[in-house]
Image (cartoon, rainbow, N blue to C red):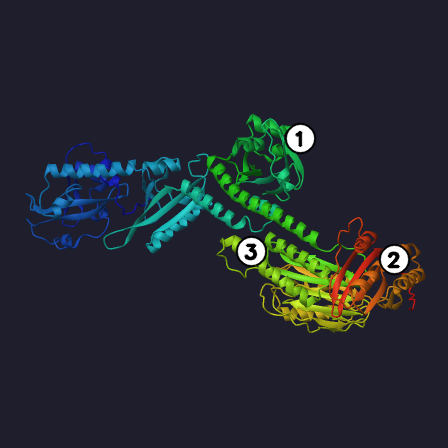
């Protein structure tokens, strides 16, 4: 094997077997033709050649390169001349040896001229300066060389030296330890010849690259080393070119550092960083738990399960029992490196319990993660308890498990279990620390999702409890409605709608939207809804109702600002929009007023879509600006569509585009209100939007003229009896004989009250729809009230008697006075008779 020209520590005294304390002085005789004629014993020790191998051979065979320029200039010197300097030679085993040379041209007794050469590796520095080397200085050079050799041998970092053919020249003890082979066994071999695995093939290629380009390379690898030591290691290898004084690449050194700890630290940091990004992307408990399992599997675990305490799963506070009791749980997520999670002994969504001695129960009891191997008694007892679990452990070779409690804000939520069966190494303390860290992050996200889900459920329950119930008996219109909560994490909004039964067979239609989301918006919506119902009950027209509602919002805003800022808050944060309308089935008139809310859409019985102009007015809470009522005369079977702006808005379109789409969806449709609702939502909300949607559809009806009877009442006492008799005949015509007695009493009291305390004109009206309504109108705006009559008072009991005999009663103001009305309940259904008795 041809050796290269790289000097190593083996080229010095330590590598040649010299045991003396003094310097080596090799004596060589060379004739004028350049052939060796004499070879001294020290030359054997310095260069390794025996005399028989060198006598008669040209001296140039010893050279590792060209002669220095100074030596060439003395090739034709005269006897007595000499030269000293440094020459590179080649040792017998192939490595380079730098020699300090003194050469003198001499003539022997026979007149033959020859060169006497004295050379030694220790004398180089002294000869360069033209001084002879003293023994003390030579001893110091030898000590320095020994220190260099000892340092390299004792260096904990593996170091190897390669020649220009990428063959190993030398290596220190640390390098031979990681290879598991003696230096004599691997010297002269290429790295790929030492180990054919791909990682060493790649290193061999990189070594060639370094020698070709003259630039160093850093290479990282992870796997089992050459020595076959159990466990995988991470190593960083630095390949560094060795260059001479002229910058030519003469070889290469390789330094290997054990990077296992840094490798695992970087890997843990990467997993933790990935967990912070991937876990908690939604406010869904199940999805968050699944994200924890997905992050862990394939990175440091082979199978992961996430179990929540059963009480937590059902939205309750945790009820973890003492260590002597089993703990009920529910599996909400699991993931495996194997498709379909065949290792699982419980399907996702299934319920079970942990025995008190099981790893998950231990983790809950201690509040810290626990680690077990398959040989631990607790693990074996737990797995053997369930045949399916024991079979999975045996079949898939599960050998290591960690149980980590999921706790956040002092609340224990459940346990995450991590298993290994494809990864050979068992879990260690670093793995447990990593599992605890990412589980803690996931626990916070699960707790956030749990709290959000609970708050959302409460908000939704409050909101739905405030929405109108289906089945309300009224004859003015057939009603259908939809409410869709927002599909975002912002929480429920303050959208609401309502249908209010009003006196005179009328109905009130309301749609509103409170600014903001969450419980606060829902609570505000509830207060406004209650206020609208209260104001509607007293019969206020739409514009007056919105004016009172605007004042209420301003007061609420001031109260909240005062409470939040201790009197220093700024009003104006609370706001809402509202559309309020009243439909009268007798006059077929709908009156609407808007407080910053979209106007209704009207669809005629023929399918034509119109957009009535309802002045929007200011939103509630602005104050100081009026509202305007618009009256719409509607044919029977017209459709009124009221909605909140969440129906029209989306990320892909603006409100104008949404309104055009709504009109197209309504055009030509004659379906029932329920079908209209579904068709509109299908057309405008193919996906859950970012805002709540409230939709109210009313198909108007007209109360038949035969169901309404009207009589003018002169303001004389004699007309009271005539009014009673007229009402009795009308009820008999309607087939309501059972209501005659009560109705006569009500008519008598209301007409008498109007004659005594009001002014003309006085009118009596009977309305037969889902109930029987008796109304007496007069020209006075003074509202009556019940009072407590004393034992001997002759009056004061009329309204009390009316309140006791009827289902409800009340008054409402009109443009010309007031109306006192009372309503009796009747059997369900529309009236069969449509007969009106003339006065």
In the depicted structure, whether residue 763 falls above or below residue 340: below
Q: Position of residue 275 (x, y in %)?
A: 51, 47
State the CA–CA distance, disc 3 to disc 1. 65 Å
Count of numbered circles on the image: 3
Quadrant where the C terminus sits is bottom right
Instruction: Name the outermost residue toward the front.
Output: 792
Counting residues from the N terminus, which is met first, the one under dot 3 or under dot 2?
3
Helix, strand or loop at mark 1: helix
Classify mark 2: helix, strand or loop. Answer: helix
Could you tell me if the residues under marks 2 and 1 are in contact, i.e. CB atoms within 8 Å?
A: no
Upstream in the sequence, badge 3 or badge 1? 1
Quadrant location, the N terminus: top left
Residue closest to the eye, 199 or 353: 353
Q: Which residue is mark 2?
A: 743
Q: Which callout, 2 or 1, points at the residue further toward the start of the chain?
A: 1
From what the image shows, is residue 683 above or below residue 270? below
Closer to the eye: label 3 or 2: 2
- Please provide percent x and percent y for residue 495: 65, 59
- Which structural element holds mark 3? helix
| Residue that label 1 marks | 387
Q: Is residue 45 left or right of residue 402?
A: left
Label 3, label 2: how many angstroms apart (C-alpha)? 47 Å
Quickly name the residue at label 3.
559
């Amino acid at each position: 094997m041809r050796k290269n020209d790289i000097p190593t520590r083996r080229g010095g005294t330590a590598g040649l077997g010299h045991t003396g304390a003094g310097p080596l002085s090799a004596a060589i005789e060379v004739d004028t033709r350049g052939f060796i004629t004499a070879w001294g014993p020290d030359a054997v020790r310095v260069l390794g050649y025996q005399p028989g191998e060198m006598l008669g051979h040209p001296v140039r065979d010893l050279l590792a390169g060209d002669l220095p320029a100074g030596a060439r200039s003395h090739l034709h010197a005269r006897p007595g001349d000499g030269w000293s300097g440094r020459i590179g030679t080649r040792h017998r085993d192939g490595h380079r040896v730098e020699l300090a040379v003194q050469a003198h041209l001499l003539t022997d007794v026979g007149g033959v001229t020859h060169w006497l050469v004295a050379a030694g590796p220790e004398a180089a520095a002294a000869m360069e300066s033209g001084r002879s080397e003293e023994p003390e200085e030579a001893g110091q050079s030898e000590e320095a060389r020994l220190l260099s050799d000892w340092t390299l041998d004792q260096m904990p970092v593996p170091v190897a030296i390669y020649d220009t053919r990428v063959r190993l020249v030398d290596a220190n003890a640390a390098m031979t330890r990681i290879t598991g082979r003696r230096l004599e066994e691997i010297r002269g071999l290429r790295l790929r010849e030492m180990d054919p695995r791909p990682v060493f093939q790649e290193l061999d290629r990189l070594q060639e690259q370094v020698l070709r380009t003259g630039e160093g390379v850093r290479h990282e690898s992870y796997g089992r080393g050459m020595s076959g030591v159990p466990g995988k290691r991470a190593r960083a290898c630095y390949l560094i070119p060795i260059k001479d004084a002229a910058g030519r690449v003469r070889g290469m050194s390789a330094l290997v550092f054990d990077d296992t700890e840094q490798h695992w630290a970087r890997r843990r940091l990467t997993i933790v960083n990935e967990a912070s990004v991937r876990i908690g992307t939604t406010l869904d408990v199940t999805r968050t738990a699944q994200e924890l399992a997905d992050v862990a599997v394939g990175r440091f675990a082979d199978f992961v399960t996430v179990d929540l305490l059963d009480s937590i799963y059902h939205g309750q506070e945790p009820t973890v029992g003492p260590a002597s009791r089993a703990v009920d749980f529910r599996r909400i997520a699991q993931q495996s490196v194997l498709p379909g999670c065949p290792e699982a002994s419980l399907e996702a969504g299934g319920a079970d319990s942990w025995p008190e001695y099981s790893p998950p129960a231990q983790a809950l009891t201690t509040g810290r993660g626990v680690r077990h191997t398959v040989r631990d008694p607790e693990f074996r007892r737990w797995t053997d308890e369930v045949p399916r679990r024991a079979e999975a452990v045996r079949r898939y070779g599960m050998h290591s498990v960690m149980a980590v409690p999921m706790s956040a804000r002092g609340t224990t939520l459940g346990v995450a279990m991590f298993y290994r069966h494809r990864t050979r190494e068992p879990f260690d303390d670093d793995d447990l620390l990593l599992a605890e860290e990412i589980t803690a992050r996931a626990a916070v996200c699960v707790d956030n999702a749990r709290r959000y889900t609970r708050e959302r459920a409460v908000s939704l329950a409050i909101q739905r409890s405030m929405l109108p119930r289906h089945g309300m008996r009224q004859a003015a219109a057939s009603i259908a409605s939809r409410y869709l909560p927002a599909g975002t994490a912002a929480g429920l909004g303050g959208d609401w709608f309502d249908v209010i039964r009003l006196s005179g067979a009328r109905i009130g239609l309301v749609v509103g939207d409170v600014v903001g989301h969450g419980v606060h918006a829902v609570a505000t919506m509830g207060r406004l809804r209650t206020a609208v119902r209260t104001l509607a009950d007293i019969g206020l027209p739409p514009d007056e109702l919105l004016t009172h509602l605007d004042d209420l919002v301003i007061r609420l805003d001031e109260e909240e600002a005062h409470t939040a800022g201790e009197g220093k808050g700024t009003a104006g944060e609370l706001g809402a929009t509202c559309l309020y309308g009243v439909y009268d089935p007798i006059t077929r008139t709908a009156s609407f007023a808007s407080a910053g809310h979209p106007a209704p859409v009207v669809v005629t019985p023929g399918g034509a879509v119109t957009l009535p102009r309802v002045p929007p007015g200011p939103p509630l809470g602005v104050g100081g600006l009026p509202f305007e009522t618009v009256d719409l005369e509607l044919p029977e079977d017209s459709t009124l569509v009221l909605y909140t702006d969440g129906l029209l808005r989306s990320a892909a379109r603006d409100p104008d585009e949404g309104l055009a789409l709504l009109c197209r969806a309504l055009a030509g449709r004659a379906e029932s209100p329920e079908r209209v609702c579904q068709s509109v939502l299908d057309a405008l909300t193919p996906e859950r939007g970012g805002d709540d949607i409230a939709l109210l559809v009313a198909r108007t009806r007209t109360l038949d003229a035969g169901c309404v009877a009207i009589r003018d009442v002169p303001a004389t006492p004699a007309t009271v009896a005539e009014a009673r008799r007229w009402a009795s005949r009308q009820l008999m015509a309607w087939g309501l004989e059972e209501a005659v007695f009560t109705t006569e009493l009500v008519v008598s009291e209301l007409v008498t009250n109007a004659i005594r305390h009001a002014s003309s004109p006085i009118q009596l009206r009977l309305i037969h729809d889902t109930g029987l309504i008796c109304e007496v109108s007069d020209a006075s705006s003074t509202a009556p009230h019940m009072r407590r009559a004393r034992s001997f008072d002759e009056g004061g009991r009329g309204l009390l008697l009316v309140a006791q005999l009827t289902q409800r009663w009340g008054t409402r103001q009109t443009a010309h006075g007031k109306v006192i009305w009372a309503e009796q309940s009747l059997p369900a259904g529309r009236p069969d008779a449509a007969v009106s008795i003339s006065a």
